[in-house]
Amino acid sequence: MDQGTVNPTMKLEQQGITGLGYVYYNRSEAELQDAAVAAGEGVTGKGGTFLVTSGKHTGRSPKDNFVVRYPSVEDTIWWENNPPMEPAKFDALYADMLAHMKGGTYNVQDLFGGADPAHRLDVRVVTELTWHGLFIRHMLRRPDASELETFTPDFTIINCPSFKADPEKHGCRSETVIALNFDAKLILIGGTEYAGENKKSVFTLLNYLLPEKGIMPMHCSANHAPGNPVDTAVFFGLSGTGKTTLSADPSRTLIGDDEHGWSDRGTFNFEGGCYAKTIGLDPEAEPEIYATCSMPHTVIENMVYDEDTMELDFEDDSLTANMRCAYPLNYISNASDNALGGHPKNIIMLTCDAFGVLPPIARLTPAQAMYHFLSGFTSKVAGTERGVTEPEPTFSTCFGAPFMPRRPEVYGNLLRTKSASHGATCWLVNTGWTGGAYGTGARMPIKATRALLAAALDGTLIESTFRKDPHFGFEVPVSVDGLDDKLLNPRDTWADKDAYDAQASKLVTMFSDNFEKYVPFIDDDVKAAAIG
């Protein structure tokens, strides 16, 4: 039985998905939440939020992501980063998942990936869990009712958490599987309730498709000066580095918090919402994001709460440190109406340095920018991925290796070309530790980071006096108004200077060792900018 608004010529039956029980097309946020609560998937919290836990999977499962290996993608997929699945194994997986779905109740959301109509992807998301429909309705862009009547998906995602994959039969690693099939225009997700896999799948699709159009897909947040989209800034960084927090600056207009494209027309958000980490969320430091945690239909994922008062505990990470809230972009008062910006004037690369040796901000040359973009040094933050329990130094190329289906140089060259064409200034910003490594030092004060970013974005920082860092070669401001000069020179923040020197040397070696694999693919100026 079908209910809801849908293109009558493009129901699931027309896609070969038959034998289901009830299918609900394009339900509203209120309808989805009511149905999810009625099904026992979660409960209604303060302000009409939706509180839910995702079981044993409280983060992405990158090792369980596969790309189906067809001749059409053989030469363009970065196979070292995207494990292959044989077509016959995918066919078996699809057949078994469809058989598993027979007689079940499913929700369908027809949505857009991309705010620029010229470059958007029309995505159909079929979910077993009703709350996943609510989540993805927040995260992607919602068509008008009239657009739904003619909606034809470019790709379809089927998410069935109760389905358990068979590694031997389906060519995967475990009972959890995320399989991307470019030829069939299908993504199958099974064995995980973590909602983030839905949005990650769309991002991966766009990361593959857009470079063919000369568009750079970016794992970044973005904002622009009020009333002036030409003054756009983008913020690269992995989860937990501050992308969402720092881009939600009330003095600027938010374009988006996580995923964007950079075309010949400028910057555009892929999404229609935000997926923010809530651990330690401070109502004073992050009032806008904090406020969404008591707004109607915000999905509160994996947070501990008082069952009597429904008060959320922002410090209790007993379920996961990767506790999150998902909400539509319009819940942020300074969000852009059209999610479009100009060509980036400033490019911010955020790193969470668990070694405590990088300065809070540094200016990069174009060659250094490509070097650091390809290096993607940061720390995996506790809870973002399964098995990570404390910050772990890592190199994630393009600040988003799990989302990159093509080789890193494809994205690095796009960044380099576009930055040069449009005269962007690049900055490396450390939101990690100062005064010592993780366990000894302290997290970089967010007020200091915001002050430095404000100076970078309003153009005053570029007029400062800079010194060349002896270890890393980039330029670091000597002093900034209102900031302790000592913070700008990490060595000065360490009680044990010899320990700092040892840590810095260790990190230099890590940079050098990591970059060896890119040397055959890069130009001489980038090689000259290499560390170590």
Image (cartoon, grey):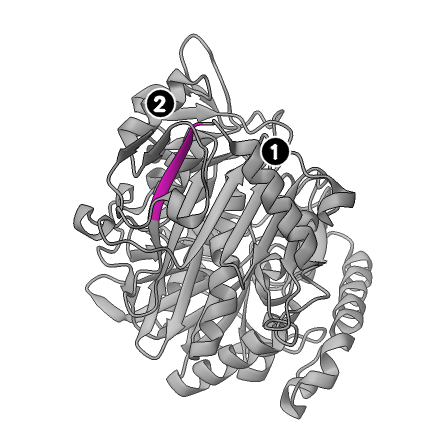
Q: Is 94 situated left or right of 203 in this image?
A: right
> Based on the displayed image, in which of its 4 quarters is residue 97 positioned?
top right
Looking at the rendered structure, the kind of residue marked 1 is Phe
Helix, strand or loop under label 2 = helix
Helix, strand or loop under label 1 = loop
Q: Nearer the viewer, residue 383 or 11?
A: 11
Q: Residue at x 61, y 51 (%)?
A: 179
Q: Which residue has dot 1 on it?
A: 163
Looking at the rendered structure, the kind of residue marked 2 is Ala
Q: Residue at x 40, y 11 (%)?
A: 309
Mark toward the start of the polypeptide (2 vs 1): 2
Q: Nearer the viewer, residue 25 or 227?
A: 25
Q: Nearer the viewer, residue 249 or 463?
A: 249
Q: Which residues are magenta?
A: 105-110
Would you say residue 44 is visible in this rendering? no
Q: Residues within 10 Å of mark 2 (few under 14, many from 20)?
A: some
Q: Is 429 situated left or right of 28 in this image?
A: right
Quadrant where the N terminus lies? Answer: top left
Q: Is residue 6 above or below residue 507?
A: above
Residue 355: give x, y in percent of width and height. Answer: 72, 55
Q: Main secondary structure of the magenta part?
A: strand
Q: Residues within 10 Å of mark 1 (few under 14, many from 20)?
A: many
